[in-house]
Image: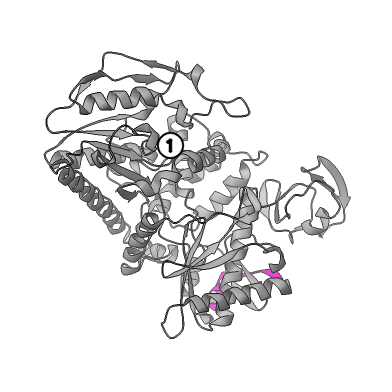
Amino acid sequence: MLQIHCLNTDTTKSFVEGTTLQEVLAEFEFDRPYPIVSAKVNNVSQGLRYRLFNSRDVQFLDITDRSGMRVYCRSLCFLLAKAARDVFSGCTLYIDCPISNGYFCNIIKSDGSRISAQDIELISARMKEIVAEDMPFHRREVPTEQACSIFKDLGYNDKVKLIETSGEVYMDYYLLGDTPDYYYGRLVPSAGFLTLWGLIPYQGGMLLQLPDRHNPSQLAPFVDQPKTFEMFNESRKWNNYMNLATVGDVNHAIQKGNASELIQVAEALQEKKIVQIAEEINTRFRGDDHVRLVLITGPSSSGKTTFCKRLSVQLKACGLRPVSFSTDDYFVNRVDTPKLPDGSYDFDNFDTVDHDALQRDIITLLGGGEVDVPEYNFTTGIREYNGKRLKLGHHTVLLVEGIHALNPMLTNLIPDSQKYRIFISTLTSTALDNHNWIPTSDNRLLRRIIRDYNKGAFTARQTISQWPNVCEAEQKWILPYQEMADVMFNSAYLVEFAVLRNHAEPILASVPKNCPEYAEVHRLSKFIHYFNQVPDTEIPSTSLIRGFIGGSSFIK
């Protein structure tokens, strides 16, 4: 008999070998406001059909948990893929990007035409039929060669490239009814679990709407994000033009010895965009509005500091004199920092910054005055004035960088016409395959894990533990203002994960398996293994990615 300890109840019960998690769940009573969709077994995510053959700790999850939500979303994507194929035989589905609290998707029918609003209704109706039938998902494990053969026969060459470059001997794939597909994580047991979703026309394709993780009884609110979509679209068009739309494509290019060229092109693309931004600032500086204030923001580990340095270089090439400081220097003294409900400091709160003092100094500078600029002492938690004085010259542009830089209340006394606002995202435009999009925050999390570890600031376990709070704060304080930007800059790097893998794997391996954070370590380790490794020797010292892996000429 097995001893299964349920963390939801903190009790242990005995079961026979081979019992499924779904059967175990039926034996434990605890409050379940929302349906259970998956579980963590010894801190590893598993589907409810997973069979237990040894004593284990088990935590059952609904979609309020990030891991549970990923399981739900993967399963929903498979439901959409099957319905699309059932309605339009031979079509190609692209789950292109997460946006507007859903997934933007597109379908090319076998005759090359795109879908219409009526087509979307047909697909939605078929999805509802599959859910009503409670069609089961089944997992199969087969040799890699067999998996490649299955997907080659279906015309899924994107999956074939991914699988054959993975280096694995055996691979898992899934069936929904008689339809096979590949997903890199677990799914729900059957389509009947997928009761809440929406499918609506959007941007010439369709938006797969998802449940609200914080209120799973309703859909997440639709938020139109045309600027973010255009940034995605720009990257996606370039990737398609270069035949680098999926990880399998990039892996093939690396295996052919083209890694150096990929790095050079990635750097050139980012530099080209920075040059365009600098030239636009220069035009507006010399225009009627005489814009002299540039506000730069982005979520954690998006590359704000290095971007600000590189932009400064290009502004100098335009004949301007950039001066910059961070909103972090205007932090209130630590004892005055707002606190979270658990009593810990809320360092991401807008009121962490003395925004009245910051705006007063900005207005003084723009008016030709001189100010004492503070420096925040992160060791003592005190804002200090150490004699640093600042005054803007005739051709000077002021760059203000920080997570709250685009919050309207930070500069509400300054006319919008006198500001140039930049939002830095890290939105990976290369997908694992046509049905598996890379989560938008994974590259930022890996960047932060590596940077924190190398600086000795935090262990990987500590960084992972803090990450959910970081993401929640971003949703509240940063992301609502991204569409207000005059321009968006995507700091995601074409071969980023291939480079980060070298640094991340040994750091992730340092996290013990007996801690809750290991669940995220296991997921990230599996995910990053899809990428063929590329050494960082040819990454220039001015690269944005150098700010995280070390060797940056901008960050000492």
Residue 141 part of the magenta segment: yes
Residue denoted by label 1:
451
Query: Where in the figure is residue 55, as x and y percent of width and height?
Result: 80, 48
| Crowd band around label 1 with a 10 angstrom C-alpha radius: few (<14), some (14–19), many (20+) | many
Query: Where in the figure is residue 17, as x and y percent of width and height?
Result: 84, 57
Q: Which residue appears at 49% of the width and 60% of the height?
A: 437
The reply to whether residue 328 is visible in this rendering is yes
* Depth order, front residue of 89/141: 89
Residue 542 part of the magenta segment: no
* Residue 510 shown left or right of residue 365 in the figure: right
- Residue 408 falls in image quadrant: top left
Q: Determine whether the residue tagged by mark 1 lies in a helix, strand or loop.
A: helix
* Depth order, front residue of 494/18: 494
Query: Where in the figure is residue 255, as x and y percent of width and height?
Result: 38, 63
Give the quadrant of the C terminus: top left
* Colouring convention used in this rendered image of the protein: one colour
Residue type indicated by callout 1 = Arg
Query: Where in the figure is residue 127, as x and y percent of width and height?
Result: 62, 73
Q: Which residue appears at 57% of the width and 78% of the height?
A: 122
Q: How many marks?
A: 1
Q: Which residues are magenta?
A: 135-150
Vertical side of 316 occupied by 341: above or below: above
* Residue 112 shown left or right of residue 396 in the figure: right
Q: Which residue appears at 29% of the width and 44% of the height?
A: 543
Vertical side of 426 occupied by 192: above or below: below
* Depth order, front residue of 357/258: 357
* Depth order, front residue of 544/91: 91
**Residue lying at the far bottom of the rendered structure:** 111
Vertical side of 273 occupied by 92: above or below: below
